[in-house]
Image (cartoon, rainbow, N blue to C red):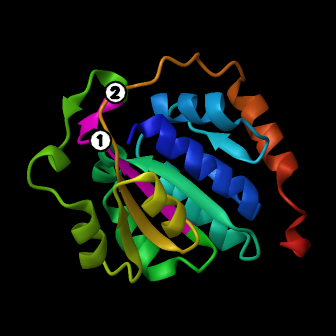
Amino acid sequence: MKRIDAIRIVSEEAEIQGAALIGNIGYPSRELYAVGDRQANFYMLGSMGLASSIGLGLSLARPGLRVMAIDGDGSVLMNLGTLATIARHARKNYLLVILDNCCYGSTGSQPSCTAGCADLAGIARGAGVSDVREANNAEGLRHALAGSGALLVRVDKGNAPVPIIDLSPAQILERFSGSLPPSGSS
């Protein structure tokens, strides 16, 4: 499955679930913007490895809000501590979707450690994440998006030819913040 197709499925399901969606840095955010832009999407433009942490923080601050984060294998490898923190603190309103293409796709497709020996689903389980699922195709992905915890999705290498996001960081934040229900109602 192509990454952009997986992102489209996650985006569609986030909209159905009324979820806030945090997009990983680089091409994954650009692909999300191209296939499913909405105000409830937060696009990372400069912080590799932090989509999972931002999603977790939002889910903790807003326990009544469904939150999904899309992160890549390289980003999760850069911030492995996020898995232990998710295991310890995440609630049922949070789902981390890890798109594993076994490379650093936004910087030239250099192999990541998942191309060799690293098993992110196994690492998440070892960190204590109680609900870890894996998907290798569109049907499996659609089915697995209803849960919480961590979902590892195997995707093909390659970036879709999508434009750069034409929103400033301030515009992204303003749109996203404005899309969230008031604190007391979530």
Q: Position of residue 139 (x, y in %)?
A: 47, 59
Marks 1 and 2, how far apart at CA = 8 Å
* Magenta stretch contains residue 114: no
Amino acid under disc 1: Asn
Q: Position of residue 49 (x, y in %)?
A: 41, 46
Amino acid under disc 2: Gly
Magenta highlight: main SS: strand
User: Dot 1 corresponds to which residue?
Assistant: 101
The answer to whether residue 27 is above or below residue 10 is above
Magenta region: 95-105
Q: Secondary structure at mark 1?
A: loop
Q: Which mark is residue 153?
A: none
50 with respect to 10 (left or right): left
Mark 1 or mark 2: which comes first in sequence?
A: 1
Residue lying at 66% horizontally and 50% vertically, measured from the top left: 12
User: Dot 2 corresponds to which residue?
Assistant: 158
The answer to whether residue 123 is above or below residue 22 is below
